[in-house]
Image (cartoon, grey):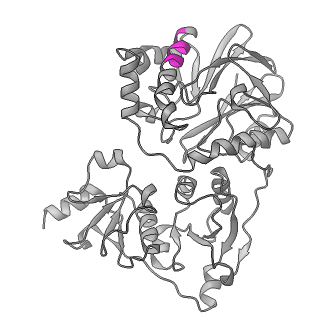
Amino acid sequence: MQVMAVPDPGLGNTSYVVDLGDGSALVVDPERDPLPYLTAAHEIGLVIRHVAETHLHADFVSGARELVALGASLIAPRGSGLAHAHHPVDGGDEVPVGDLSLSVVASPGHTPEHVAYVLNDGPNPKILFSGGTLMAGGVARPDLISPEHTVPLAHDAYRSVRHLLASLPDHVEVRPTHGGGSFCSAGSAATGGVSTIGSERRGHPALTAPDADAFVTDLLDGLGAYPSYFLRLRPVNQRGPETLGPDLPPLRPVSPGEIAGRVVIGARPIARFSAGHVPGAVSNELRDQFGTWLGWLFSPDTPLVFVLDPDQDERELVRQALNVGHEAIVGRLDLAAWTAAGEPLVTVPVLSSSEIPLDAPVVDVRQRSEWDAGHVPGAIHVELGEVGAHSPVPGGAVIHCGHGQRAMTAASVFRRQGIASIAVTTAGPQEIAAVRAGR
């Protein structure tokens, strides 16, 4: 039984392509771009005939409809209320897939409609595709629906995990969708990956907690901020996104005269952005986390123009933008054309830890958990996801995040708010604090 994992490091998620034994494949929780799944199936001579969704996703636009348009059938929880073609299932249902079968297990917690799928070879359960309900060492967060549902869903998660661990044999693999680095994960699940029922039975918090209330309290205490776009993608997935096919649309060339009223996103590495960029551009270096920050900082109807270097992967940028629901892509601006038209470039200073003035305010834009683990004494803390709504920071401030990418994004946003005297450092908090302590 061959299972191919298709990870998305930026979102901390994994989809799966499963060999069903008859030349067909099942895909579990696919993202918007169908190409990785088509490629994985093709490499071992399979045709994708089935798609299974564990829940309505908040962190990415589902690719299920893309695969259905290419000939697959979709299995999804009845409670998701999808407005496009699918086979609705409830807990207790059995669904044949190729030479195997799926047992559907109702598993609310991460979301109300959530189900898990047990892949069976005849009477033998082999793999649990647990979505966000059962993760290695934890569960996915229960607070993405509404505040009034958070505590009830946390209790549902407790019951769902205990039911799954009690009803399946030790050897069954646990393959979650959400994993390490996912903003959907909570607490100790932040490091979770593939596990087994036996391993989770020996140490999962739902079994080791004194009772449900203690589990829920610990779970909710460990929740941090999550991207704002999570609040708008469940309805998008319910309606069903437009299908694009494996050939994602390219970025069309945009002339300097077309950028008025558009937001320019500088996707180049931060050193190149620092050395010269379009005035008012927002830095968001193309990397695994590009889509997360794009979706967090801008509404989906914001018309976007991108600046890339020739050696950067344009298709990857488009994939990540579409994956978080950004369809208003205007195109690509060539910096050479910009400067040839007589338009100016501006710069942002990047300082080493020893170059930061002693009296300069330090602004830390990391997540709360990172700040709590250690920060520069006297620093101002503003999570990157909040910089757009935050009052401007003091002039002369130096922004840091530990590596520089998030700091440059924050600095460019603050500059759009009118603060020209902003600098960035790639130094981490320990290095900055040590230099300041030694002066």
User: Which residue is drawn at the image coordinates 17% and 64% (left, top)?
Assistant: 436
Which image quadrant: the C terminus?
bottom left
The residue nearer to you, when weighing 16 against 223, is: 223
Lateral position of residue 319 relative to residue 230, left or right: right
- Please, which residue is most extreme toward the top here? 123
Lateral position of residue 407 relative to residue 358, left or right: right
Give the magenta-colored segment's residue range: 159-166
Is residue 8 located in the magenta-colored stretch of the structure?
Answer: no
The residue nearer to you, when weighing 61 against 337, is: 61
- Residue 46, given in percent of the width and then of the height, sits at 81, 33
- State which quadrant residue 131 falls in: top right
Is 290 rendered above or below residue 54?
below
- Please, which residue is most extreme toward the bottom here? 342
User: Which residue is drawn at the image coordinates 53% and 53% (left, top)?
Assistant: 289
Give the number of marks.
Answer: 0
Lateral position of residue 425 relative to residue 46, left or right: left
- Please, which residue is most extreme toward the front here? 148
Residue 420 visible: yes
Residue 141 visible: no
The residue nearer to you, when weighing 313 against 307, is: 307
Which image quadrant: the N terminus?
top right
- Residue 206, given in percent of the width and then of the height, sits at 43, 18
Is 239 rendered above or below residue 306?
above
Is 147 rendered above or below residue 250?
above
User: Which residue is drawn at the image coordinates 67% and 59% (left, top)?
Assistant: 318
User: Which residue is drawn at the image coordinates 34% and 14% (left, top)?
Assistant: 210
- Residue 305, given in percent of the width and then of the height, sits at 64, 70
- Residue 183, given in percent of the width and then of the height, sits at 49, 42
The residue nearer to you, when weighing 157 against 336, is: 157
Is residue 163 located in the magenta-colored stretch of the structure?
Answer: yes
Q: Main secondary structure of the magenta part?
A: helix
